[in-house]
Image (cartoon, coloured by chain):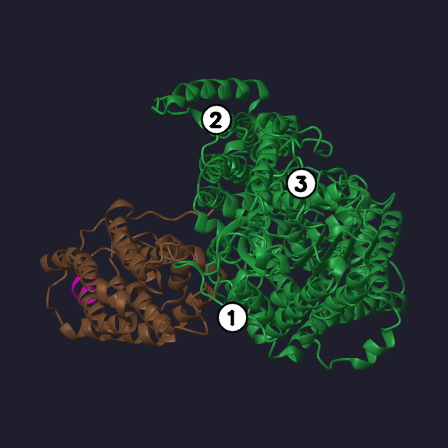
Amino acid sequence: MPRSPTLRLVSLAIANVLLLVAILVFAQGFFPYKPLLPGLATLDDEQDVQQWMEAEQEEAVFDRVVVMVVDALRSDFVYGHHSGFDFTQSLIRDGAAIPFTAHASPPTVTMPRVKALTTGSVPSFADLIFNLDESGSGSTLATQDTWLAQIKARGGKLIFYGDDTWLRLFPGDFFERSDGTSSFFVSDFTEVDNNVTRHVPSELRNSDWDAMIMHYLGLDHIGHKTGPQGPNMLPKQREMDGIVRTIYEAMETKSHLANTLLIVAGDHGMNAGGNHGGSGPGETEPALLFASPKLKQRRDRQEYSCPTHPKAGTDFHYYRKVQQSDIVPTLAGLMGLPVPKNSLGVFIREMAGLWSMPQSTTLALRHNAVQIKRIVEAAYGAQSFGTLVQRWTACLSQGDGGAQIDCGEPSGADGALARYWAYAASRPGESVVGHEVNSNAKDEHIMNFLNAAQEELSNAASSYDIPRMTLGIILGAAAMAFAITSLPAIWPASTAGMFFAATSLLYGVMMFASSYVEEEQHFWYWMTPAWTVLLTVKGLTKDGRSAIRIIAAGTVVLAVHRPAVRWNQTGQKHAGAPDIVHAFFSEHHLLMWVLILATYTRTWYVLVRRTFLALVPTEFAVAAGVALTIPAIIFKLNFTQADAPELVQGLAVLVRQWTEPFGLVLQGQLTFSLIGVAAIAISVLSIGLARGTAIGKADGPAVDVTLAERLHHLLTLFLITQSRAPNIPLFLGMELQLLAFAVLLGNPARSLGAQSPRRNASLYISELATSTLLCSHVYFFCTGGSNSISSIDLSNAYNGIANYNVVAVGVLLFSSNWAGPVWWCSAAVLSTFTRPVKIDVEVSTAGKGERAWVQDEREALRREAKLEHVSKVSGNDLPEHWLVYCASMTAFVATSLLAVMVACTALRTHLFIWTVFSPKYLYAMAWCIGWHIMVNISFGSLLRWLGQIA
Amino acid sequence: MAPDAEPKVLQSAKPVELLQSQPSFFFANLQPILLLGTLLFSFKSLVADPVHTLLGLAPTVAIVQAIYCVVCLPSTGDVAAPTPKPGQKKKAVKPGQDIWAKVIPAFLSFTLTIVLSAPLLYIIVILFGAPLTTHHPHTLLFALHLALLTTPHLYYVHGLDASTWLRLASLQQPIDESYGMSLGACVGAWVGAIPIPLDWDREWQKWPVTVVVGMYVGAVVGKLAGGYLFKGWKIKLA
């Protein structure tokens, strides 16, 4: 049932708009935006506490705090038997330090973790989306309630040294003194830390600050680079231990530091590969340690042995496990500060022994409980929660006589919390019999409430907005329906159409299996050879084509595919297994650079031959190619030297010395601006030349190089610049595969028949769509991508950028992680155009030289230009090929997105929802918005249009 | 090949009929039971020690396949023997006519299978993603088994005629029992790779157990489907 093109165009547009809406609506329900209580908490407004008991303020135990954040300080680095923290371990043994394992909830990346450590809230994946925005000029933590803001509100002063994430979160003059360090290059193990340490001795002599925060990055860099067992790990741990010693000894000797608390904390851990972001083993288990000489004199002291083993059955669970957010109320209690309003932390009871009076503990817990109760009220409604509490209080007070009265079981989470609260609040009025015992019982009840509230409020499952998620699914289904409507005909399906549909369906089914989401690459690595063989087999059935040529083309696709899938090991199950980049290139970096240079040479050649040659004189074309390629190579060389020096070693020392004075940012900017200038110049020249001739007409005569192809080669250079050095040779492979696909996809039976070849290639468009879809995904995964947050490669996101810029970083980040998929989309556009195939040429130039070939072609073109009224009947169905391509891609994206949404909804209580399915949804968003709508539909259509007019 | 000759060949392609004899029917039906049975009973040792099990199974499978060729299938010469008139009733094959006329093509078929098919399939299997740097004996033996299940009967029936093999490779040959078996084994081996990445942590998920099982099941399913359900069909790639 053929449908009219207009109808299909309309439904395609509707489908894509619906896709966008569905994504956003679902995301709002799946990653709900938790309303924040505005303003700073003050002690005065805690009326409830004063109602509870004698209005007194617990004494502040500490007046200063030093927070030493060591990035990726996994628990075993401090507490294990192979730790370099000898001095710190001796502090734990002496009772001067209390150790914990602090649970860091995913996403385990620095920014959300800093939020948890300062506000006490539990940042979710939503924060990851707003990560870019928030670290820009948007909302920061400066206006939120944090323990830093509380110190400042009291008139205290803060100083900060280390990772500049903090300075982005607390901008302006929030800190009295600060020195930020950016972590552009993970190869930097020493500078980032020395930059912090050099301030420590002088600041320890100063007495004007109330809180000193340090954030060391070196250990994280070592983890990323060489893993947790790397050779630099132990020395770095000793270095960090030395800083703990410096601070602790200053606390012992200097009088102004006598009441200082030292907190040593990791913001997150790392997995066996040294990466983090998800919730794999080790990633969520950083160390947390409180140290002060005063801790030795605490009551009820518990002894800790150290070094020690993790809890049985775990790898990184040492001592008691607390939440990272627990630091916030603990610090507030010990320093006599109000608990920040949005904190979900629970006072760490081990620290209570610091108070001489047990009532102080109770009071601190009360403050904590009242503060959390406000959040409970905000979540469940103050009115309804109040009613529930009244019910439970009334019921419990009946039981005061001693007899237990059965009040029934609470219904729902709020009911349970109300019961805990009623217990916690009802006891103070009772008679005091045995002060100590009673106090403990009170504390128990408050702790019960706090723990229950923390678990309930941090638990993501409770905060899904199911109606919104359902609406998102319905919209997604509608998008899929419209996408299918926009296809010209569903039945009878072509082979490629069936394969495409099968791919979409299988992919959708796969989204429900957590292991297949983690190991998605296998699906594409598995489908692609099958498709290649099918395409080859089909090619053999077409008439008029040499079987050898077809088989050779199929073999080339497979022969490139096979090493490409081994290029970077990806996925979770075998993360860190040997692959070409990590096991082979690290040994043979010379060969790698030969391949990289070969790729650049090829790019230079096509830039000259295809992009420039017909527009400018030969000499100029060669020069332009050189002018574009050389800065790109030098930038890549210097960048790699900074990012991964082990891949450069002693290569091209002279070049590097000579370019030393020019910063990397400048080199990046030069490379990008040259590409940009070339793109504009080429477009202007080409369009100018084509205007008014037959070339500019719709489905005009085939030209040797379309504007789309000229721009494609420039795009290739850009994408190469955005790729990590070891991945660059893959571009050579992609070029080879594209050539092979041209043989497999072409349909010479039709173009041979035509007297004058048209611009639009005659091919089965669903074959092109299937090939593009498969290759895009294969190259996303084989360049190191996966469905885990920790595999996002940030190294190329700041190329040529000196100051943070959301849009620029976003574009660079996407183009570096999706370089392969973007390239294949552009290549798909090229495949829709033909070159003037050599039919005339072969006949006429027999025995003539190269020159004659060119002459003939020009002659043919001229003849073509004169034939103004070319009949368009033959090519009438061809221009809308692109519409079919877009419709197919939309159908796939809609199907996959719908599957991911349904999977996320159906499995929302699944153990893996935050580790597997949520990151997958973020990736699905990136594929849909970034790859599909921005690249395939928008950029692809633009390129296609440019190819048609020039 | 001459391009103008091709259409003629295409038209003349016919599904291969089994030999019309009692032993032929008997063994044609026994073969899938033998293949699957052997696999079923050696599954445990296949999981425990794939290399030795596959090595031990190879002669058995080869013999089953060889008997199948000799007893059930017409050899190349028989097919080439012209049937004078289209309407004429098929000549009954005399059993035990000349045993050497069958054994020699069978022997050649198996020689080709080992010398030509197995290495070629090894390369293809590697290109499809089989381990390249490890598991060499596993992959080699898997390729050998794949070769044994896919090609000896095709060599036996079709010989080495280039145009026939081009038709076989491009799915132009009408489906019959032996062709169905070959296609089924290939598809089955491909499908057999699905469970490998799942996180069930079972012993049998390791290479190449699942693909071997998939290949055998696929071969049998393909043989039955090709022999009964889809006999004479032509796959159309549009």
For the residue carrying disc 1, how many other residues have a C-alpha within 10 Å: few (<14), some (14-19), or many (20+)?
Answer: some
The CA span between labels 2 and 3 is 66 Å
Q: Nearer the viewer, residue B162 or A185?
A: A185
Whether discs 3 and 1 lie on one chain: the answer is yes
Residue B37: in magenta span: no
For badge 2, the amino acid type reads Glu
In the image, residue A879 lies at what x, y percent? Answer: 68, 40
For badge 1, the amino acid type reads Pro
Q: Name the residue under label 1.
A: A578
Residue A288 seen in the figure: no
Whether discs 2 and 3 lie on one chain: the answer is yes
Q: Colour of chain B?
A: brown
Chain letter of mark 3 equals: A
Q: Earlier in the sequence, mark 2 or mark 3?
A: 2
- Which label belongs to residue A933? 3
Q: Name the residue under label 2.
A: A430
Q: Colour of chain A?
A: green
Q: What element carries label 2?
A: loop
The CA span between labels 3 and 1 is 35 Å
Give yes or no for contact between labels 2 and 3 (Cβ–Cβ under 8 Å): no
Q: Which residue is drawn at 73% across and 34% down?
A: A40
Residue A317 seen in the figure: yes
Residue B69: in magenta span: yes
> Disc 2 or disc 1, which is closer to the eye?
2
In the image, residue A688 lies at what x, y percent? Answer: 89, 48
Q: Which of A520 and A939 is in front in this view?
A: A520
Q: Earlier in the sequence, mark 2 or mark 1?
A: 2
Q: Which residue is drawn at 22% across and 63% down?
A: B44
**Magenta region:** B68-73
